[in-house]
Image (cartoon, helix red, strand yellow):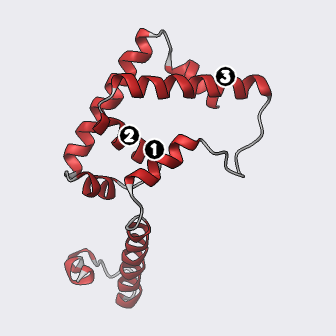
Amino acid sequence: MKILDNLDSFRGESRFTVWAQKICVRTAFAEMRRSRWRDVSLEDVIDRQGEGAVTPSEPVMDPERATAKSIVLADFRRFMDEDLTEKQRVALLAAIGGMPFEAIADRMGTNRNALRKLLYDARKRLKRRMQAERLSAEDVLGVFA
């Protein structure tokens, strides 16, 4: 069906079979990415974010920088708990956890556009809170760089 839907985009610069195979491979990869999240609940993703586990690929940092990072993360957790609605917090943690928008929207019973608006409002609230606490984006990003 994808090949037929995209037939008008075939320019003849390669063989038809190569072009069709490329569409099939891309469609299969997209489906594999989506299916990876089918059996994952929002709660699982949020729990993983709350654990703050260090991944093996994350470099070991000096104690001063690790302390600064944990303070910033604790502040953000507090900001999220105090300033965001439950729905905003859940959506933001799921997005940070890498869950695709379609999967988040489906599990929250909403659509993709409403989810984008929800996340926009959440980021706006967090930005206002950061400004009220006199935290600049550069300071925060400097801790994670």
Residue at the spot 28% in from the left edge and 56% down from the top edge: 107
Q: Amino acid at mark 3?
A: Ala
Q: Do we see residue 142 in this rendering?
A: yes
- Can you give x and y, in whole percent of width and height, for residue 117 in the image? 23, 38
Residue 119 in view here? no
Whole-number angstrom distance, CA of label 2 to CA of label 1: 6 Å
Real-space CA distance between mark 2 and mark 3, rounded to the nearest whole angstrom:
22 Å
Q: Are marks 2 and 1 in contact (CB under 8 Å)?
A: yes
Residues at marks 1 and 3, CA–CA distance in whole angstroms: 20 Å
Looking at the figure, which quarter contains the C terminus? top right
Mark 3 Cα-neighbour bin, 10 Å: few <14, some 14–19, many ≥20: some
The image shows residue 36, relative to residue 21, as above or below, that is above
Q: Which residue is mark 1?
A: 96
Residue at image mark 2: 92
Q: Amino acid at mark 2?
A: Leu
Q: Tell me which corner region of the image, top left, top right, bottom left or bottom right, holds residue 91.
A: top left
Towards the viewer: 95 or 70: 70
The tag earlier along the polypeptide, 2 or 3, is 3
Helix, strand or loop at label 1? It is: helix
Across the whole image, how many numbered discs are drawn on residues?
Answer: 3
Label 2, residues with CA under 10 Å away: few <14, some 14-19, many ≥20: many
Is residue 69 toward the left or the right of residue 73 in the image? Answer: right
Q: Residue at x 25, y 45 (%)?
A: 115
Determine the secondary structure under disc 3: helix
Residue at mark 3: 68
Image spot of residue 97 (x, y percent): 47, 48
Give the vertical position of 81 relative to 119 (above or below).
above
